[in-house]
């Protein structure tokens, strides 16, 4: 049998890569892992973790306003962007240290370098030029923001990566995109006092979400003062003495300090040596894998966003666990990508799991839709007009709840619990038998006893 330097070598130090390396090493395998930037990946370093910290920071302006309705007198307040950045950087450094410590404790060998494939078993470490061999290789290099290089003036724009490291908070910003990254950052910047405009080519933001949530969030954002331009795109960006001048397809002219492109993410596969190793990719550059995350080369696996299956951190971790079970525990395990609960940390939040009304109507002959919209209790004294929306999609044939959707405070927290409920196959009768927790917003989920309407063969009745 051939002799290798490592039993497993992982390229990419994000959530999926670190989990597979750490667990394999703890099982006694000789493991190496290489990361060219920082350990922790997009989520920890310049993704969901720092973004959530920014979300918290941006909410305080409304908290201060709401306090008056509850008898509090809040003095003059001000915001310091540099202090937020410093605090965020300190926390991210702490988390990166924990990722490294976990690998160290498991006795994995850590390489701070870009790594590329030479062939199916050989990896080149670019910092030193050293080559190492491995019996099994995992590619977990994640994704990167789409820079939209066809756009004239794209080099004057920022992506979500740079948004976490701006030297100064802009006075005005134009964000291109209608997905969760664009929507979340629009709310963040607005909450921090930035004049914010969102531009999106589609008819409505958040194209893959339930239409009621999309409409409700759009209305709430505009009521806050965020300008949303749908059916439009940026055609050019030019630098001026006062900032940036933007022309749109609909012949609008906008002058802003900063333009942020949030136009999707692409798999991070460029110059990885995939062709030399024989690893197949699709038209979008994503690594093609089978149901066990195995690539076209039997000893090479790929996990997370680089495969462009479901771009969520917990999914990458789940795929890593399945990889370990399959390769090192003689227990072939397929990642389960069904019924994944997700959240959009917009303001108000979205929490969702299962099918939208539109998708469920295509799958089932008859649906029962339970819908409640109400003013949350917290808003009664604060005077805020924001509404909560809760919606359950039920297959009428067997009463199984096939979709649950929430717009409002703590929607993400509720979606996590609903994820368990729907995964277990609970029916609407199970919801009805469940006692409510009062007074909470979540009690609406178990007190909607009569359908708001039905859908038969795709038509509302």
Image (tube, rainbow, N blue to C red):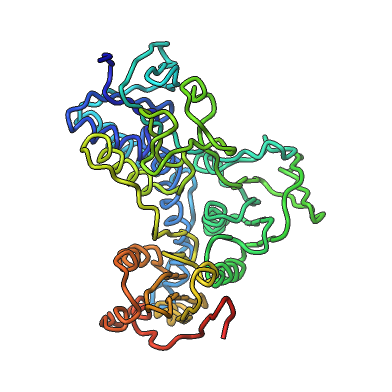
Report the residue at 45% width, 45% height from top. 47
In the rendering, at what x and y percent does residue 236 appear? 76, 43
The N terminus is located in which quarter?
top left
In the rendering, at what x and y percent does residue 254 appear? 75, 52
Number of marks in the rendered image: 0
Report the residue at 44% width, 45% height from top. 83
Furthest toward the top, the residue is 129
Q: Nearer the viewer, residue 253 or 290?
A: 290
Q: Is residue 375 left or right of residue 13?
A: right
In the rendering, at what x and y percent does residue 119 appear? 43, 18
Furthest toward the right, the residue is 251
Q: In which quarter of the image is residue 413?
A: bottom left
Q: Nearer the viewer, residue 18 or 425?
A: 425
**Above-or-below relation of 4 to 309:** above
**Above-or-below relation of 115 to 97:** above
Q: Can residue 449 be seen in this view?
A: yes
Report the residue at 52% width, 78% height from top. 385
In the rendering, at what x and y percent does residue 277 appear? 46, 22
Q: In this view, does 33 lie to the left or right of 311?
A: left
The C terminus is located in which quarter?
bottom right
Q: Can residue 239 be seen in this view?
A: no
Furthest toward the bottom, the residue is 450
Q: Nearer the viewer, residue 429 or 38?
A: 429
**Above-or-below relation of 234 to 344:** above
Q: Which of 19 and 45 is in front in this view?
A: 19
**Above-or-below relation of 134 to 62:** above
């Amino acid at each position: 049998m051939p002799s290798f330097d490592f039993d497993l070598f992982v390229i990419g130090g994000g959530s999926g890569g670190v989990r597979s390396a750490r667990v394999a090493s703890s099982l006694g395998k000789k493991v190496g892992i290489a990361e060219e930037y920082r350990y922790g990946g997009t989520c920890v370093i310049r993704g969901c973790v720092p973004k959530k910290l920014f979300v918290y920071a941006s909410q305080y302006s409304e908290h201060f306003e709401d306090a008056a309705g509850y008898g509090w007198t809040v003095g003059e307040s001000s915001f310091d962007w540099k202090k937020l950045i410093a605090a965020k950087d300190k926390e991210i450094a702490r988390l990166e240290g924990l990722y490294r410590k976990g690998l160290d404790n498991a006795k994995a060998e850590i390489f701070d370098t870009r790594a590329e494939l030479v062939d199916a078993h050989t990896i080149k470490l670019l910092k030193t030029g050293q080559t190492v061999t491995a019996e099994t290789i995992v590619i977990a290099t994640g994704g990167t923001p789409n820079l939209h290089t066809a756009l004239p003036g794209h080099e004057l724009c920022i992506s979500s990566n740079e948004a976490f490291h701006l030297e100064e908070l802009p006075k005005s910003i134009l964000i291109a995109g209608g997905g969760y990254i664009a929507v979340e950052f629009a709310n963040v910047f607005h909450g921090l006092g930035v004049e914010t405009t969102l531009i999106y080519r589609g008819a409505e933001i958040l194209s893959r979400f339930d239409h009621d949530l999309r409409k409700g969030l759009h209305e709430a954002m505009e009521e806050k003062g965020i300008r949303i331009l749908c059916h439009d795109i940026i055609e050019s960006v030019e630098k001026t003495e006062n900032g940036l001048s933007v022309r749109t397809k609909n012949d609008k002219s906008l002058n802003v300090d900063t333009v942020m492109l949030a136009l999707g993410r692409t798999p991070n596969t460029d110059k990885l040596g995939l062709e030399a190793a024989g690893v197949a990719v699709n038209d979008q550059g994503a690594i093609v894998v089978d149901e066990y995350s195995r690539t076209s080369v039997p000893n090479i696996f790929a996990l997370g966003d680089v495969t462009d299956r479901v771009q969520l951190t917990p999914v990458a971790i789940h795929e890593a666990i399945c990889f370990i079970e399959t390769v090192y525990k003689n227990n072939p395990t397929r990642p389960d990508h069904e019924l994944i609960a997700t959240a959009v940390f917009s303001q108000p939040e979205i929490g969702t799991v299962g099918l939208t009304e539109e998708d469920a109507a295509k799958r089932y002959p008859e649906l029962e839709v339970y819908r409640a919209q109400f003013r949350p209790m917290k808003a009664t004294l604060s005077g805020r007009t924001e509404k909560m929306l809760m919606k359950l999609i039920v297959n009428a044939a067997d009463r199984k709840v096939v979709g649950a959707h929430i717009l409002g405070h703590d929607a993400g927290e509720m979606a996590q619990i609903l994820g368990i409920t729907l995964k277990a196959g609970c029916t609407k009768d199970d919801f009805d038998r469940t006692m409510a927790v009062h007074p909470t917003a979540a009690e609406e989920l178990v007190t909607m006893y009569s359908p708001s309407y039905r859908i038969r063969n795709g038509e509302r009745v």
